[in-house]
Image (tube, grey):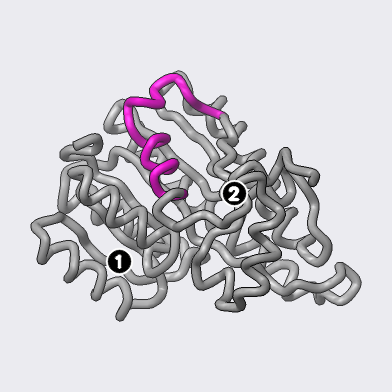
Amino acid sequence: MRLSKKTIIVTGASSGIGASAARIFADEGANVIMGARREDRLQALEKDLRSRGKTAITVVGDALDEDFAQRLVATALSEFGGLDGAFNNAGVTGPMKPLEEIDLETWKSVLDINLTGAYLAAKHQIPALQDRGRGAIVFTSSFVGQGIGLPGMTAYAASKAGLIGLTQSLAAECGQQNIRVNALLPGGTLTEMAGDDPDAHDAIASMHALKRMATADEIAQAALFLLTSESSFVTGSSLYVDGGNSIFKG
């Protein structure tokens, strides 16, 4: 039980990588606080976890609502007496368009959800981790904007690259307080965001050295590693979990 009695926040928990992470963390003994906008999905996941004897609580809200970030932490404090870690995973891809076709409102929306949402989450998580005397934060970034560039993904790439800068600066700020901060860089992953077109999946898979896309569980397992004591000397890092996408040019 690698997260036994640890209290962990997971945002973007209603589907995909976030939902997989919530299940895996709960199976590893964590008290999981699941945050997202889609209440019906969160409640279904909570019901499933509780039916198997796991500990999970749902907090519904938007990543851009500072009150939501506060409520997630407040729930950890009131229900479990503190916070041990967070997987800040909420995000969007945004439109696949050339930069000149992206209007300012759309540009700001992608950066706000992916980057400002992460700032708001960490802003309220860090004091709780300081009170605990230790902890770990993991952000979901991307190989896009770090390892490679892809046409039509400028807003997404800018926001995810920004997350890496946020990760590094927070790691430097919080290291003396025994708080580790890392970024996860997934490759193509079989989630709702990837759509359901098999031809598109084949094209994405061909970009990876492993010639396939990841499952959501595979990405969540990497987040688990970054939240456990197994990564106790890892901070400020950008962990590629991309099936070799970033190094493959064939």
Residue located 36% across and 58% down the image: 20
Residue 234 image point, x, y percent: 48, 24
Question: Quarter holding the N terminus?
Answer: top left
**Badge count:** 2
Side (left or right) of 18 relative to 153 = left
The three-letter amino acid code for the residue at tag 2 is: Ser
Instruction: Report whether 4 appears left or right of 162.
Output: left
Picture coordinates of residue 178, whole percent (x, y): 39, 23
Please name which of the two marks, 1 or 2, marks the residue nearer to the observer: 2
Instruction: Give the residue type that dot 1 points to.
Output: Val
Residue indicated by mark 2: 141
Q: Which mark is residue 236?
A: none
Is residue 204 toward the left or the right of residue 36 in the image? right
Left or right of 225 in this view: 114:
right
Give me the residue at 24% from left, 38% from top.
Answer: 3
Q: Secondary structure at mark 2?
A: loop
Please determine whether, in this image, residue 212 is positioned above or below residue 166: below
Q: Residue visible at 25% across and 53% down?
A: 32
Residue 85 in the magenta stretch? The answer is no
User: What's the CA distance linking mark 1 and mark 2?
Assistant: 23 Å
Element type at mark 1: strand
Q: Position of residue 112 (x, y in %)?
A: 63, 62
**Mark 1 highlights which residue?**
59
| First of labels 1, 2 by sequence position | 1
The boundaries of the magenta stretch are 219-236
Q: Is residue 202 above or below residue 243?
A: below
Q: Position of residue 250 (x, y in %)?
A: 79, 46
Q: Residue furthest bottom?
A: 40
